[in-house]
Image (cartoon, rainbow, N blue to C red):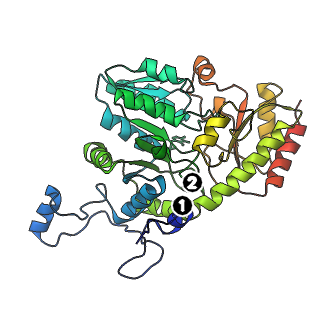
Amino acid sequence: MVKKEWRFDTLAVHGSEGIDPHTGAVSPPIYQSSTFAFRDSAHGEALFKGEASGYIYSRLGNPTEDCLEREMAFLEGGEAALAFSSGLSAEAALVMTLCSSGDNFVTSITVYGGTYALWKSFMPRMGIEPRDVRATHLDAIEAAIDDKTRLIFVETPANPNLDIIDIRGCADIAKRHNIPLAVDNTFATSALQRPLEHGADVVVHSATKYISGHGDTVAGILVGTREFMDRVRKETLNHVGFCISPFNAWLLLRGLKTLPVRVRRHCKNAMRVAQYLSFHPKVKKVYYPGLRIHPGHEIARSQMSDFGGMVAFEIKGTREDGKKLMDSMELCVLAVSLGDCDTLICHPASTTHSTYTAEQLAEAGISETMIRISVGVEDPRDICNDLGQALKRIG
Ligand SMILES: *Cc1c(COP(=O)(O)O)cnc(C)c1O
């Protein structure tokens, strides 16, 4: 049984209540089964009517997935959670549950590139209008709301420029207009930031990133009230089949056990890398909320317990120099995604955010020469040395 007084690091290890009642297995079993037998036909009927609780079919629910959802709800301080096949399917389910054709939602323009493409390319085909604003300006959010607005969606820290959005400020606007606020907590994770405590209604994760932590699966999570999670499951998830596989749910359960330990190391290493780059003569600008010069530093301090593992920077030089820098890396891996044990480096304008036009990049505060690093858990001296030898080769 999970105890009320348990702290975050303990919940991360024990929160899933994964010990198998039948065998005592300490690692939760993977229920790799698509369907579940009814005791008799009356039992089957009762399950379908919702009069009995139990499993029917894995698109509708699975014990390994349940274990993960319980644990994520504990870690975010929410009533319930839902697991999805990817971060984007979690986001799609959120919008598709709240919005119908003719409705709109307000979104930060500075979001994960795939999120932006889902909003701008897909949602309009459903008759749903995304209204993108620079959410660092709270008045821009408020100005975009009308009587057809069904959701406010922000990501903080934001991808890729580490913009910090004031969650409490957004929540106040959302409450005034009686609209739910969803916060994409992928960059910070529940280990550093729990948006529900700051007034958000729904938390979104690409669990592909820090929650998995090892670059071995794609998955997504929503956390919120029991009532709303039941609604998303019944009205959207069950119909469209955005469900997670039992094996992927298990990989996330395994990742969660070390989440607090890994995230502490990511933060420590990222601060080292940010400071190293700040003093490097070939670096023009560093984006890391842990640096006092970052415009969101004070807000980050008030809503996060540390500043995360993501750093972005611009070099003094051209886009070609940027390419040369990336091609000179020996330790840092040239790849999108983030939150892995391995340090990953990418150029957002040509990869993750290539769906943005030049104007949209400018509006979102994403420089064409920005380079993003997901700082891994290696020895920070080796990461800095690798950046140093690559920087030497340019300019
Ligand atoms: C990766 C990512 C997503 C999308 O998640 P997938 O698991 O790739 O579908 C959404 N938001 C953020 C902040 C991300 O980094």
Q: Give the position of the N terminus as an image quadrant.
A: bottom left
Residue shown at the point (14%, 64%) measured from the top left: 44
Rendered position, 357 above or below 388: above
In the rendered image of this protein, does residue 63 appear above or below residue 181?
below
Amino acid type for the residue under numbered disc 1: Phe
Q: In this view, does 115 lie above or below 131?
A: below
Residue 9 at what x, y percent from top left? 56, 63
Residue under pointer 1: 8
User: Which is more toward the observer, 199 or 367?
Assistant: 199
Q: Residues within 10 Å of mark 2 (few under 14, many from 20)?
A: many
At 47% from the left and 51% from the top, the residue drawn is 219
Q: Where is residue 111 in the image (x, y as percent from the top left)?
A: 54, 33
Q: How many numbered discs?
A: 2
Query: Dots 1 and 2: beta carbons under 8 Å?
Result: yes
Helix, strand or loop at label 1? It is: helix
Q: Residue at x 13, y 56 (%)?
A: 49
Task: Please tell me which residue lies in front, 14 or 337.
Answer: 14
